[in-house]
Amino acid sequence: MFDPWRRRRFFRRFWEDFFSGFEFPKIEFPSAEIREPLIDVVDEGNKLRVVAELPGVKKKDLHINVLPNAVEISAKVTEKEEKEEEGYYFRERSYSQFYRRIPLPAEVIPEKTQAKFENGILELVLEKKETKKGFEVKL
């Protein structure tokens, strides 16, 4: 399956490894990259269970799209952190996105999906579509 962000991740890791031997001053900038949530997909017979870690995501910012053969999870997170230090007032914002398309090992019925989101953990229970057995032709 085509992943448009795979090449970007590869080159980011390549350059991080390449420059890791050099001493540069540490400068941190708020990240705006698209992160992939960590997931588990469990086959439970007539159901599939998908569990995804989405730290810092609020329920109102979470979008889930269930297709017969895949699940798409996306979220946008804006955090605001305020610090007061030596008479200076700082406001730092962090912005990130989550996106993951998860191919499913079996077809599901999207309309029968059950979802639960608690403490940054998304849990989806997907009912598998009943597969028709082939018809044996006797000669």
Image (cartoon, rainbow, N blue to C red):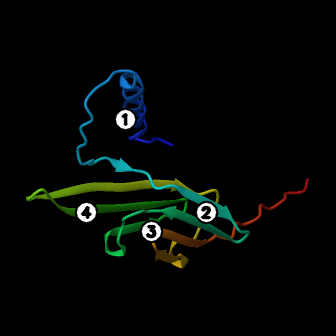
Q: Position of residue 42 (x, y in %)?
A: 66, 62
> Which of the two discs, 3 and 2, labels the residue nearer the N terminus?
2
| Count of numbered marks | 4
Q: Amino acid at mark 1?
A: Arg
Q: Nearer the viewer, residue 23 or 128?
A: 23
Image-quadrant location for residue 73: bottom left
Nearest to viewer (mark 3 / mark 2): 3
Which residue occupies 84% across, 59% down?
136
Residue 40 locus on image (x, y percent): 59, 59
Mark 2 and mark 4 lie on one chain; the one further toward the N terminus is 4
Q: Amino acid at mark 2?
A: Glu
Q: Earlier in the sequence, mark 4 or mark 1?
A: 1
SS label for mark 1? helix
Q: Residues within 10 Å of mark 2 (few under 14, many from 20)?
A: some
Of callouts 3 and 4, which one flags the residue occurring earlier in the amino acid sequence?
4
Q: Element under label 4?
A: strand
Which residue in the rendered view is the most extreme toward the right?
A: 139
Tell me the distance, in whole angstroms, between the alpha carbons under discs 3 and 1: 26 Å
Between label 4 and label 1, give the one nearer the viewer: 4
Relative horizontal placement of residue 108, taking residue 111 as reference (left or right): right
Of badges 2 and 4, nearer the viewer stands 4
Residue on which disc 3 sits: 120
| Residue position for label 4 | 79
Question: Label 1: few (<14), some or many (≥20) within 10 Å?
Answer: few
- The answer to whether residue 123 is above or below residue 19 is below
Task: List the residue tagged with mark 2.
Answer: 107
Q: Residue placed at 57% from the left, 65% from the top?
A: 50
The residue type indicated by label 3 comes to Gly
Q: What is the spatial separation of the Cα atoms under label 3 and label 4, in whole angstroms?
A: 15 Å
Residue 111: where, in percent of width, then height? 50, 77
